[in-house]
Amino acid sequence: MKSQIPILILLGLIALFPVLVFRAKDDNKNKVYLAYVLLILPYMSFDLMPGLEEFTVFDLLSWSYFFVFLFYNRPGRNSIFGLLGYAVLIILLIGVFNSDFFWRSMMSYLRFVSVIIFAKVLLTELKEDPDFFMQLMRMLKIVLLVALIFMGLQMIFGVKISVTFSFLSGNFMNPNIDTIEGIRYPSYFQDPQKFAQFIAALSFVFLIYDKKRSKALWLNLLLFLVAVVSLFLTGGRGGLLGLVIGLGFLYLFFPMRYKLLFAVPVVLLFMVISLYKQNFVMFNRQTDTNSALDERTGFWLDALTIYNKHPLMGIGVGNYQLYTERYKPDNYWYAQDEITFFDQPESGYLKYLIEFGLFGFTVFILFLIIPLVRSVYLYLVGVKDERLLILVASPLSWMIGFITVCSLTDVRIFIVVTSLTCALIHVMQQADKSLAEREAHLPYGKNAIA
């Protein structure tokens, strides 16, 4: 049964938001909005319109901040990423009007606009105050630590405390949590697979630390190890694969001194796994990878039949579940006396390809791919900023897990992925500036770089 106390606390926090923003100085208003969203992240997905269409706390904060402040004080453009943001909004809006389920699609579209507002504010703040970058990293570390602490509480008091704290919609618990192999801990998320992606992406921020503090390195490495061990308790193989690929990417490009430094925690991690393997649900799952892949392949083929009917503009953002109910009614799962039709085809990329169409999906992917590719290029041509590699590994690890589960349906993960991508864009733009300044002082321009 849900307690009313967390809801009352949440309402108090919502009421406090405009007070803090109005009292803040003009150059701190963006920081108040960003910090508020991140530091009460568990409640950002709380539905303020139950029984109607989903309108969350995050939507309320973002839209109210937009109309009161950003509408009258529009920040400047952010180069190609601003254009990509506007392009995807226009394409998705066309898809909304072309959709068979206009109202549902429009509400999902407004959610997407909320994320764009958040990204715009964050990119602007990072551009105007570069020192805010480390504040952002600290807040993201707090976000992950809060999730891990709550997972610890679930291990003590049971996973249903998520319902008590009003983190879940209704009293519904995902059937993937309590399995015959053991409990897969989801923290304050509804799906442990999404939590695994969340850990995989955010764990890398512990590798960014204040180098002026001698103890910061070992403390952050310890917290990184704690995050990795916690991932095993989720049972999410997609998240684990993403983490491994992210670590492999860092090992490939990092200087030798960092490779040797990483050897210590990696050895400790393997020792923990070998000694306590039976205690991790990750290694006790009875469904083998091939069986899971065969099952997902069936879902993907069903989904492609929907895509083939709407290849260019898609079916409208947020409409996959309604199309499943109408055209693929056998794609559902049954739990706690409720039938729930699939809201994704067990692939984040395929879901958005179907909903956005080819045009919208291409723009959406470019927003992720461009900073990743450009950052690796900048590092290779001589901008030796390790933050470039770490912030590539972070969204890269999430992108791997996204192949099998669309975690962005949880707005809290959407916020985190957006934050990490914006942080990468900021560091990439700084590296671009550094490279341009260096080339300006070279006698033969770009070709003089060794």
Image: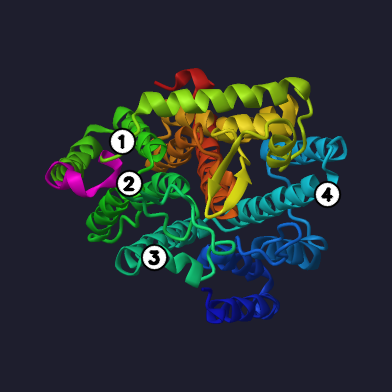
- Give the camera-side residue of 221 and 285: 285
Q: Which amino acid does label 4 sit on?
A: Trp
Q: How far apart are marks 1 and 2 (CA)?
A: 9 Å
Q: Distance between the residues labelled 4 and 2?
A: 40 Å
**Which numbered disc, 3 or 1, marks the residue closer to the eye?**
1
Picture quadrant of residue 151: bottom left
Q: What residue type is labelled 3?
A: Phe
Please report whichever mark, 4 or 1, sits nearer to the chain's N-terminal start: 4
- Residue 439 position within the rendered picture, expressed as x and y whole percent measured from the top left: 52, 29
Q: Would you name the residue on which mark 4 appears?
A: 103
Segment tinted magenta in the rendering: 272-283
Q: Would you name the residue on which mark 3 appears?
A: 150
- Give the camera-side residue of 8 and 177: 177
Q: Would you name the residue on which mark 1 appears?
A: 286
Q: Distance between the residues labelled 2 and 3?
A: 23 Å
| Residue shown at 43% from the left, 37% from the top | 397
Q: Distance between the residues labelled 3 and 1?
A: 27 Å
Question: Would residue 170 be found to the left or right of residue 213 on screen?
Answer: right
Q: Would you name the residue on which mark 2 appears?
A: 180
- Residue 154 position within the rendered picture, expressed as x and y whole percent measured from the top left: 36, 64
Please report whichever mark, 3 or 4, sits nearer to the chain's N-terminal start: 4
Q: Which amino acid does label 1 sit on?
A: Gln
Picture quadrant of residue 449: top left
